[in-house]
Structure formats: structure tokens, C-alpha cells
Image (tube, rainbow, N blue to C red):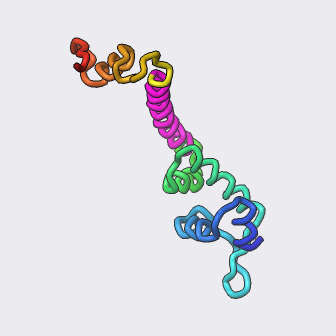
Amino acid sequence: MTIGEIAGRFGLATHVLRHWESVGLLTPARVVAGRRRFRSADLYRVATILHAKEAGLTLEQIRELMASAVPARRREILLRHRTDLLARIAALQDSLRFIEGGLECEHEDFSVCPHYQAMVQARIAPQATPHVPA
């Protein structure tokens, strides 16, 4: 496949594939005049890169993951990223609770809601006595 064909198949710009090649993620075959030819194995690599990017891995992490021949090293990279993802998920869940609290508040102005004020106070100083703004 040509670079245009593989880019179209995945909905990518060709410059993205060229960049991935420049950082060592892809190594397409070269034919007459140095034109790139992507093989079926390259389809697998592009799909893997896309999944890894969607999971939040950096290109460097993806390169290291794909280049390592040591299963324990690949597992270590995934475990470290899993820990990061779990922390981000927890933070997003807290954010969602904050937004939902504002939306579900029965007060016309959610900022006067005791529940909202308690959430804010907990963020300011968890051990301090709640203070209600005037």
C-alpha cells in the first residue's frame, strides 16, 4: 500500500505516518525512487499505535513498548501507565461529581448550596471548619 492508501484507511494525514516513521514507530519498505510501501504488518503497527495513543501513551512510550524484546519491560511500561490512568480516572470522577452536584442542586445559584460549599471547603482545607461566604 502507498502512504496515501494507509493514511486513508485509518483517517490520518500522511504527515502523521511520516512523523511516526521519523521517530522509529514505522519502517515501511522502500521501492523505486525511495517511495514508501506499507505491508500488512504495518497495518497492525498503525492500529497498535492508534490504540496506544487513545490510551494516553506518548509516542516515546509506544516506541519503547513496540521496540522492547523483553516481555517484562513491556509489562512494566503498561503497569506504570495503568497507574497513571487510574489516577486520572479518579480525578475525572471527582470532577464529574462536582459538575453533577452543581447541576442537581435545588438552589437557584449552586454556589450557595451547602453541599457545593462543603466540597469547596474540603478542597481548601480538609481539617478546617466550614466557612460559608456572605
Whether residue 90 is visible, yes or no, is: no
Q: Quadrant of residue 27?
A: bottom right
The region drawn magenta spans 74-101
Q: Where is residue 68 shown, x and y percent of the image?
A: 56, 52
Whether residue 74 is visible, yes or no, is: yes
Q: Quadrant of residue 108?
A: top left
Q: Relative to residue 66, is residue 47 drawn left or right?
A: right
- Which residue is pictured at 50% across the width and 32% down the height? 89
Q: Which part of the image, by quadrant, shows the C terminus? A: top left
Q: Where is residue 51 shown, x and y percent of the image?
A: 64, 48
Q: Relative to residue 36, is residue 120 drawn left or right?
A: left
- Which residue is pictured at 59% across the width and 47% down the height? 54
Q: Is residue 77 magenta?
A: yes
In front of the other: 107 or 102: 107
Q: Which part of the image, by quadrant, shows the N terminus? A: bottom right
In front of the other: 96 or 33: 96
In front of the other: 51 or 97: 97
Magenta span: helix, strand or loop, mainly? helix
- Which residue is pictured at 57% across the width and 50% down the height? 53
Q: Which residue is outermost to the bottom?
A: 33
Q: Where is residue 99 shown, x and y percent of the image?
A: 46, 28
